[in-house]
Image: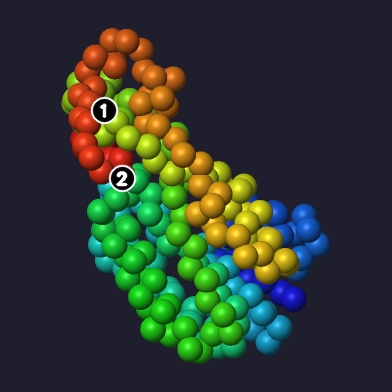
């Protein structure tokens, strides 16, 4: 069994490559500096697609489309008869922005082409790096921008936990759902660990009857 891991230079890709190799599996790390056409596809049996454009205010919609959809279209050309593992996102950190929309379009592309694959698993990821979420809120409050924060819970999972889940999927055909491993966190608890009282007074809290949390800057 040879496993192709795309997006291998990203944090999730690196964790998965390291985890799989530490358990004796043969891994081909792939990054955008390489060419799909140059790979030997004959004995690649599993594709773990971690490739994605990292969310940033400087990224354009076209860049999201190229990285999250066009790349996937090209990858599918080589994926016939292979097991395909893909990551979607339901992170509160990216709720309703174009990054998440492009990932949802990628899900649809995979589902439409699932008949060519040996197997398809789309894993919905929660917030993986809540430090970034807290840093943005703290930075906004420190600058006096009065971020609004819904005082609710959010789902969290570490990169390492995702990597071990993928390893178990591949080697043990585990039937456990990734959502069963989500850790519930409370935004205000995390904020209180980081904010001084002076900054906390600048944060406007809203209580809403929703099952998600977001912040608005």
Q: Position of residue 55 (x, y in %)?
A: 36, 51
Residue 211 numbered mark, or none: 2
Judge left or right: residue 28 versus residue 8.
right
Front-most of 212 and 103?
A: 212
Q: Which mark is residue 140?
A: 1
Q: CA distance from mark 1 to mark 2?
A: 24 Å
The circle drawn on residue 73 is none
Residue drawn at point x = 45 percent, y = 80 percent: 74
**Residue 33 placement (x, y as % from top left):** 53, 66
Under circle 2, the secondary element is loop
Residue 78 in sight here? no
For label 1, the crowd category at 10 Å Cα-Cα, with few meaning under 14, some 14 to 19 and many 20 or more, is some
Which color mode does the image show? Answer: rainbow
Q: Is residue 210 visible?
A: yes
Q: Residue at the spot x=43%, y=73% of the render? A: 71
Estimate the x, y position of residue 127 in percent, counting from the top left.
Answer: 43, 46
């Amino acid at each position: 069994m040879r496993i192709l891991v795309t997006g291998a230079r990203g944090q999730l890709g690196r964790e998965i490559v390291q985890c799989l190799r530490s358990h004796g599996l043969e891994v081909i790390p792939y990054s955008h500096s390489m060419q799909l056409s140059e790979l030997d596809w004959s004995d690649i049996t599993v594709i773990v697609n971690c490739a994605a454009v990292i969310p940033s205010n400087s990224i354009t919609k076209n860049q999201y489309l190229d990285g999250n959809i066009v790349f996937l279209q090209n990858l599918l050309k080589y994926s016939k008869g292979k097991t395909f593992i893909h990551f979607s996102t339901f992170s509160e950190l990216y709720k309703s922005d174009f990054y998440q929309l492009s990932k949802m379009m990628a899900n649809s592309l995979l589902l439409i082409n699932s008949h060519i694959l040996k197997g398809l698993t789309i894993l919905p990821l929660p917030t993986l790096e809540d430090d970034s979420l807290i840093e943005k809120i703290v930075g906004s409050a420190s600058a006096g921008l009065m971020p609004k924060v819904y005082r609710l819970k959010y789902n969290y999972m570490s990169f390492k936990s995702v990597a071990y889940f993928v390893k178990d999927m591949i080697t043990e055909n585990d039937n456990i759902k990734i959502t069963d491993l989500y850790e519930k966190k409370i935004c205000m608890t995390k904020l209180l660990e980081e904010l001084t009282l002076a900054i906390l007074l600048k944060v406007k809290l809203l209580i809403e009857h929703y099952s998600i949390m977001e912040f608005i800057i």
